[in-house]
Image (cartoon, rainbow, N blue to C red):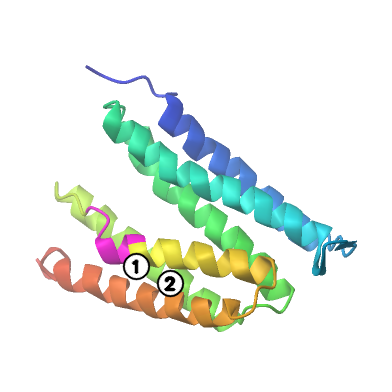
Amino acid sequence: MRSKIFNVPNTLSLIRVFLAPLVLLFLSLRIDTPISFLPEVSWGDALAATVFIIAALTDTFDGYIARRDNLVTNLGKFIDPLADKVLVVAAMLALIELDRVPAWIVMVIITREFVVTGLRLVAAAEGVVIAASKGGKLKTVCQIIALIMLILKIPYGMAVMWVAMILTVWSGMDYLIKGSKIITG
């Protein structure tokens, strides 16, 4: 039975796409008024973190609901990973501007995403589906935790971002090694 295109999982992914610019906006506006009970956190950072967390949670639920209710669609296969990348890149770009993360780390992470997406496109053209690996999922979770910590200026956020970057490179290499036959074939 074919699922409707605008089902709950796809709607959650689309919501994530539209929440990403809000994260960027709240960080870029630099609403620097501190929160009374957390003086090191500004209202802009708190709003950005709240929206980012809500958006990240939609990623958890959209895939679960799609598989549970057999609502997997081609639109969902397209929009879900795109929404993830838009959300993460929006937060990282704002954090570069705020000097909370170095641009070169963001470039490494974005490059990996382009490489893996390109590999998946080549594989799809050959009729092969490259599913998300455990390493890729771990990378995503680590990136999200690091970004929340950096948005809220939580100590060791940059250390977690380093771990996320290492996982990003490692999982990217894993995809390339596993997909090398597709590239060279």
User: Given contact means CB atoms under 8 Å apart, are the residues at marks 2 and 1 in contact?
Assistant: yes
Q: Residue at x 28, y 34 (%)?
A: 67
Quadrant position of residue 87? bottom right
Q: Residues within 10 Å of mark 2 (few under 14, many from 20)?
A: some
Range of magenta residues: 131-137
Task: State which quadrant residue 23 falls in.
Answer: bottom right
Check disc 1 and give the amino acid type. Answer: Val
Residue 85: percent from the left, percent from the top? Answer: 48, 56
Q: Which residue is at the far top?
A: 1
- Is 49 rendered above or below residue 176? above
Q: Is 176 left or right of 100, judged from the image as shown?
A: left
- Label 2 sits on a secondary structure element that is helix
Query: In this orientation, which residue lies closer to the viewer: 90 or 122?
Result: 90
Secondary structure under tag 1 reads helix
Q: Which residue is at a point 20% across and 49% down the rendered structure image?
A: 125
- For the N terminus, which image quadrant? top left
* Residue 22, disc: none
Looking at this view, name the residue that lies furthest to the front: 37
Q: Is residue 95 left or right of residue 35?
A: left
The residue indicated by pointer 1 is 115
Circle 1 packing at 10 Å, graded few (<14), some (14-19), many (20+), is some
In this rendering, position of residue 88 left or right of residue 139 = right
Picture layout, residue 83 above or below residue 182: above
* Quarter residue 54 falls in: top right
**Horizontal side of residue 105 vs 34, given as left or right:** left
Q: Residue at x 48, y 67 (%)?
A: 143
Residue highlighted by disc 2: 111
Query: 160 or 79: which is nearer to us?
Result: 160
